């Protein structure tokens, strides 16, 4: 009797379908977390939503690169190393050389130098040298060795100092005029070209994008693609209508402060659950 009962129980257990494996967030190569450090969990909230680009503003204070939007808002301990570089290296090592397991080869860490690039850049170089294993390397001869993380400098950009180096661990964030300059934007010089949306259009997301502005947007996208560089705008209306206009035009990175909202828009799904803080 007992043997028959155990046999029936085993058959019942075998007939129960296995629970599906837990899937990670959809990886979104075009999603950029603007002012990422202002979220509850810098970097981690963005990665949990599948973002592949994050932005951190930095100031050099007493020899440390502190992350904040304004100089009077810096806090000791909120360093670029602690909030971003250490966590990215941890992810890369855990995921076999990628930030997102099974995701694209590289993600962007956009470092916006708020002031004093001549002093910030040497400190940043020394810091990044300790993370060389995961970083994209750029050479003056045009060669690029893509790593899991591509560091791009924006804001007060040390362009001349960076371009004069034989090998470097950073790229420079270009501007729209660089797409037409005599020294054209190229991936080893400007892996990313960004500019202020109001310089292209006064449209704030209400009604359709004016046709003249749509033409200018498509022209900028075409120039960037011919140069082989990515394109981004800051100061866009942070609403679905603007996200749709940029996506449909082929803009490479769409910036937002609304991580879950952009994720839902790009995937047609729902916001990702928030992971426990760590």
Image (cartoon, rainbow, N blue to C red):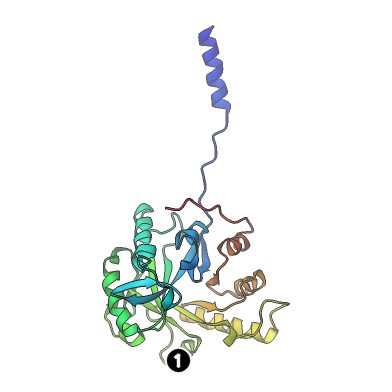
Q: How many marks?
A: 1
Above or below residue 27? Residue 182 is below
Question: Please, which residue is most extreme toward the top here?
Answer: 1
Question: Please, which residue is most extreme toward the right here?
Answer: 207
Above or below residue 28? Residue 184 is below
Residue 98 makes an appearance in the image: yes
Residue that badge 1 annotates: 181
Asked whether, in this view, residue 213 is left or right of residue 232, the answer is: right
Q: Position of residue 61 (x, y in %)?
A: 33, 76
Give the crowd class for mark 1: few <14, some 14-19, many >=20 residues within 10 Å.
Answer: few
Between residues 277 and 124, which one lies in front from this camera angle? 277
Question: Please, which residue is most extreme toward the bottom here?
Answer: 182
- Residue at (51, 42) in percent of width and height: 21
Asked whether, in this view, residue 29 is left or right of residue 65, the answer is: right
Residue 163 makes an appearance in the image: no
Q: Position of residue 50 (x, y in %)?
A: 51, 59
Q: Position of residue 154 (x, y in %)?
A: 42, 79
Q: Position of residue 104 (x, y in %)?
A: 45, 61
Name the quadrant containing residue 201.
bottom right
- Residue at (44, 57) in percent of width and height: 100
Quadrant where the N terminus is found in the figure? top right
Q: Mark 1: which secondary structure?
A: loop
């Amino acid at each position: 009797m007992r043997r028959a009962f155990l046999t029936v129980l085993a058959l019942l257990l075998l007939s129960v379908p296995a629970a599906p494996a837990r899937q990670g967030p959809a990886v979104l190569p075009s999603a950029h977390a603007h002012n990422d450090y202002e979220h509850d969990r810098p970097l981690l909230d963005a990665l949990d939503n599948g973002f592949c680009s994050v932005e951190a503003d930095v100031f050099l204070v007493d020899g440390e690169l502190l992350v904040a939007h304004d100089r009077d808002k810096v806090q000791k301990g909120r360093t670029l190393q602690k909030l971003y570089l250490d966590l990215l290296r941890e992810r890369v090592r855990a995921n076999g050389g990628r930030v997102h397991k099974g995701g694209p080869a590289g993600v962007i860490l956009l470092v916006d130098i708020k002031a004093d690039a001549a002093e910030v850049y040497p400190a940043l170089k020394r810091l990044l040298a300790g993370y060389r294993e995961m970083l994209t390397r750029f050479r003056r001869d045009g060669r690029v060795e893509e790593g899991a993380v591509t560091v791009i400098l924006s804001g007060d950009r040390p362009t001349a100092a960076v371009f004069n180096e034989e090998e470097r661990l950073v790229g420079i964030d270009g501007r729209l005029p660089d797409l037409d300059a005599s020294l054209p934007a190229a991936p080893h010089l400007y892996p990313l070209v960004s500019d202020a949306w109001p310089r292209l259009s006064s449209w704030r997301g209400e009604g359709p994008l004016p046709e003249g502005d749509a033409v200018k947007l498509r022209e900028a996208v075409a120039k960037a693609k011919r140069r082989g560089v990515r394109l981004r705008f800051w100061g866009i209306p942070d609403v679905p209508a603007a996200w749709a206009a940029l996506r449909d035009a082929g803009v490479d990175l769409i910036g937002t402060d609304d991580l879950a909202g952009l994720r839902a828009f790009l995937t047609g799904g729902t916001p990702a659950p928030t992971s426990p803080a760590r």
